[in-house]
Every structure is written in C-alpha cells, then in structure tokens.
Image: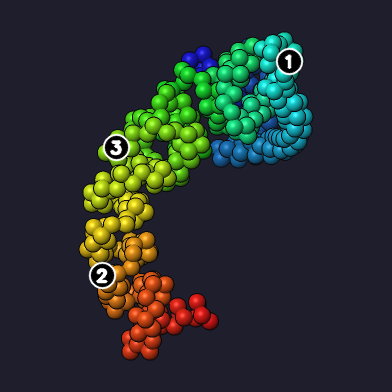
Amino acid sequence: MKYVIINNLRYYLPRIIILLICLFLFYFVYHLSFYHIHIGGNNIYNHLYPFESKTEWWFYVLVYIIIISVLSVFVLLLLSFYFDYKGSRSGAINRKYELIFSEKIIGYIYSDRLKESGLTKEPGSFLKKKLRNKLVIVSFFSVIIRIQEIIDEDLSDKFKLLFGQLGLEKKIKWFLQSRKMSEKIIALQIISCLKIKGYRKIIVEYAGSRNYVLRTVAMSTLIRLSKTDHLNVMLEHEHYISKMDINVIINEVEKNRKADIEYLSLIRSKSPRIIAIGLLLIQVRNKAEYKEMIRPLLEINDAFLHEVAWEAFAFFAGTDEDLKFMIERFDSETFNYKKLILKSLTSFKQNTEISDFVDRVIKNESILLKIEALTILFANNVERFLSYKGSDDRNIAAAYNELVDLNLG
C-alpha cells in the first residue's frame, strides 16, 4: 500500500501544481478589474483600472488564454529539449551499465572460484554501489532477464541469492505497483525470471488488463510460476483471452516444458477460448487419444473454437469413421471448413469413396473448391483428373486449366 501511495503522489503532485498555477493566473487576471488590489493586507492602486473598467468580461478570458498559450509553448519547448537530452543520456548510461552488468553477472554464474565459495562480496559489493538510481536498476533487471532467456538453465536460485544481498526486493514491489507501464512489465519479467512467490493477486489483476503487452506478460508469468504443470491457472482465468494471448500461452507452455497438463480439464472448460487452448496443446503434443472428444466441440456456437476444433480433428483424422464423418459434415460447413476437409483427405488412403466424393465437389461446389478437389485427383488419380479435360462446365474447365498451367505450364 505504501508503494501505491508514494507512486500516486509522484504522479498527481506535478499535475496539482500546474492546476494551482493556472488558478493563480486566473485569479491575478480577474483582480486587474478592481480599483485596488489587496496583497498581504495592503491596498495597491491598480494603474490599469481606468482602462480595465471599460473593458468587456470576455477580454479577461482572452488575456487568460493568451498567457496560458504563451506559457504552454515555452514549457513545451523546454520539455522537448529536456526529453531529447534525457533520452540520449539514458541510452548512453544504459549501454554502459548493461556491458558492465553482463560481465559481472556472467562471471558470478560461471566463475569456478565463485561457484566453490558461493556468493562472495566482490560482485555484491560492486553492484550495490552502482544500483543507486532507477535507470541503472532497470538496466540491471534487463540484463538479468536477457541472460536467463539466452541460457538454457534455471538460474532463479542464484539470482534470488544475488537480489537478496543487493536488497532489490523493495524495488521489485515499487516497479510492480508503478503507474508507468514499462516498470510494471519489467517487474513482471523479473518475478517470472526469478520465480518469486507472493504476487499472485496483482499478477492476476494485470492478466485482465486492457493493455495487450501487460496482459500477455502477466499471463506468461502466471504460467511460469504455477506450482504444477496442469495449467489450472488458466482454468481460473475469468477475463477475455484474445488469439494473440492464446499464442503467447502455447509458446510459454512449450518454452517452460510444462508436461503434465490436464488436457481434459481444459477441453471441458466452459470458456471456448480455454477449450481452444486445450485443443491446440493436444495438436502440439500429438495427443491422438483425445481425438474422440473433438467431435462434440464442433457443435459449440463459437467461430474461433469451431475453426480450432476442425483443424484439430483434421490433424488426427485417419480412420474410415473419420472420413465418413467429414464427408457427412461437408455440406453443412462454410467455405473455409470445406476447404480444410478437402485438404485433410490427402492423409487418407485413396479409395473409391474419396474419388466419388471429390467428383461430387467438382460438379457442385464453387470454382475455388473445384480447384482443391481437382488437386487431389491430380495427385492421386490422374485418370479421373484427365476425364475433366474439355468439360462443358465453364467453371470446371477453368479450374482444370488453372491447375494444368500451374503444374505443367
């Protein structure tokens, strides 16, 4: 709570000061219309009164606007120069310290002398002297995150030991509850990297944020911090999950080698997006034993889930029963899923049933589906493919010629 109050004070105090300055200017301009101006108990004669007394009220508003505009331009110019200077200086400092910190941290991790003696005073005392302002601390955090991403080894225990000696736990809390998005994100990344416990409530809150970057980093952190591989944290997630979020989740699961996943819990979720995550993981992990659970999911009225379910079913399809099911569902599906069904037919052993079905598609469906169907014949049944040469149907002839030009032209 203390960190929230201090961060809010830092955020609101400059804005309050600016508001007070504007009110003071308004007060000053307003008092120009009086014969005497009272300041500190003294009456000061207003030499502008003869002119001001004959002036309309709107003139004061105009003067006020002009003063504010001139001051704003002046302040904007100053801020522009200040931020340019600050940006170039910050970049130089960041590059300098990232190089220094990288050398020290790599030495701390891999030096034989340091491994034998544990954490010595050398890196701790050196780093403690350097980590005295926010910019340097951000550089240090960035180096820690980058090293952990590059090195295929869990270094969280070593980094926790180092953070404990440097007293950086308070800085993590400070950054996590900061009003600046960049500081929140780097705090989440450090918590994830070091696998620090105790921040679940605020991470879950950020996982429901409208900000895409903050939301995805928070989700990645929750997955990495989960005590088991079951992804129960996703089952508890109540906020909307976008397609990009789903990609992040799948990548994070693979990256952190989450193996013992409860696929059934994901597939039986009430959320279509959670079900989609389960189906995608089944594909990634090639869990064919869950194939029969996919069919009922095709009946759920959710476009994205319907797409993922069809892709998953087509991925595992291979039996005669699967083929029969796909042919039966073909007429009731939209163009994209019809196209997916046709493409999946190449994974089956070609037979008369498939050829007859493909013939029906060529004669009755749109030209794009005719091309897909003819492609199957071209690859598996050249004799039937050639039978469509010179067809009286313009669309079939066009599809045939397109395919011939593409493959033989």
Q: Earlier in the sequence, mark 1 or mark 2?
A: 1
Local SS, label 3: helix
Identity of the residue drawn at 58% across and 37% down:
61
**Relative image position of residue 72 (x, y in whole percent):** 66, 37
In terms of image quadrants, where is residue 182?
top right
Q: Closer to us: mark 1 or mark 3?
A: 1
The three-letter amino acid code for the residue at tag 2 is Glu
Question: Mark 3 Cα within 10 Å, few/some/many (few <14, many 20+)?
Answer: few
The residue where tag 2 is placed is 353
Query: Is disc 1 in contact with disc 3, using a CB cutoff of under 8 Å?
Result: no
In terms of image quadrants, where is residue 341?
bottom left
In this rendering, would 290 be left or right of 51?
left
Identity of the residue drawn at 57% across and 22% down:
156
The three-letter amino acid code for the residue at tag 1 is Arg
The three-letter amino acid code for the residue at tag 3 is Leu
Query: Is disc 3 in contact with disc 2, using a CB cutoff of under 8 Å?
Result: no
Residue 230 visible? The answer is: yes
Q: Closer to us: mark 3 or mark 2?
A: 2
Q: Earlier in the sequence, mark 3 or mark 2?
A: 3
The residue where tag 1 is placed is 113
How far apart marks 3 and 2 lie (CA) works out to 34 Å
**Relative image position of residue 296 (x, y in whole percent):** 23, 49
**Relative image position of residue 204 (x, y in whole percent):** 42, 28
Q: Earlier in the sequence, mark 1 or mark 3?
A: 1
Local SS, label 2: helix
Q: Is residue 290 above or below residue 99?
A: below
In this rendering, would 198 be left or right of 22?
left
In this rendering, would 1 be left or right of 358?
right
Which numbered marker is on residue 264? 3
Residue 270 or 288: which is nearer the viewer? Answer: 288
Residue 132 visible? The answer is: no
Question: Mark 1 Cα within 10 Å, few/some/many (few <14, many 20+)?
Answer: few
